[in-house]
Amino acid sequence: MSELIEQLARKVGVDVRPQGSLRLIRLQDCGGIVEACKSGGLLILGIEAFKLADGKVVPDTDLIADFSELASKQWEAAYLEAAHSADMYFSEAKDRTDLWFDFSLRQRQ
């Protein structure tokens, strides 16, 4: 799944910061990722927030979004609902510029 976010980020001109298996995106770039998912028909399964402190990646457990239950719905409804939920998630995190975000995405099979 990390290849998918890297491809999407390149397509929309967003920098990705690799940290182990994570592919971290800055808050100010997340709206572009969500829009690209919406226009490209990609399902956002989940989003996790992280702080980078003293060279360590620290999860912010207050900002975990799990949309994986949408994967059982009809595809178009699922990816659009997930994108809408992601927009709401980021509106709640809008002042948290210290955070980086990792997306779990799925393409239509």
Image (cartoon, helix red, strand yellow):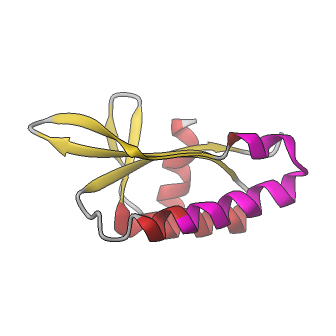
Q: Quadrant of residue 48?
A: top left
Q: Is residue 3 left or right of residue 79?
A: left
Q: Residue at x 47, y 71 (%)?
A: 91
53 and 7: which is toward the camera: 53
Quadrant for the C terminus, please.
top right
Q: Principal SS element in the magenta part?
A: helix
Q: Residue at x 63, y 62 (%)?
A: 85
As for residue 70 lying within the magenta part, the answer is: yes
* Residue 13 x/y as whole percent: 44, 66
Query: Magenta includes 65?
Result: no
Looking at the rendering, the stretch of residues picked out in magenta corresponds to 69-88
Residue 6 spot, x, y in % from top left: 49, 47
In the rendered structure, the answer to whether residue 76 lies left or right of residue 65 reads: right
Left or right: residue 100 versus residue 74 is: left
Tally of numbered discs: 0
Q: Nearer the viewer, residue 73 or 12?
A: 73
Q: Give above or below for 50 relative to 14.
A: above
Residue 13 visible at all = no
**Image position, residue 69 (x, y; %):** 75, 41
Single out the residue that lies furthest toward the front.
62
Q: Nearer the viewer, residue 22 or 64?
A: 64
Position of 90 relative to 5 (above/below): below
The quadrant in which residue 36 appears is bottom right
- Residue 82, how many percent across, how many down? 69, 57
Q: Quadrant of the N terminus?
A: top right
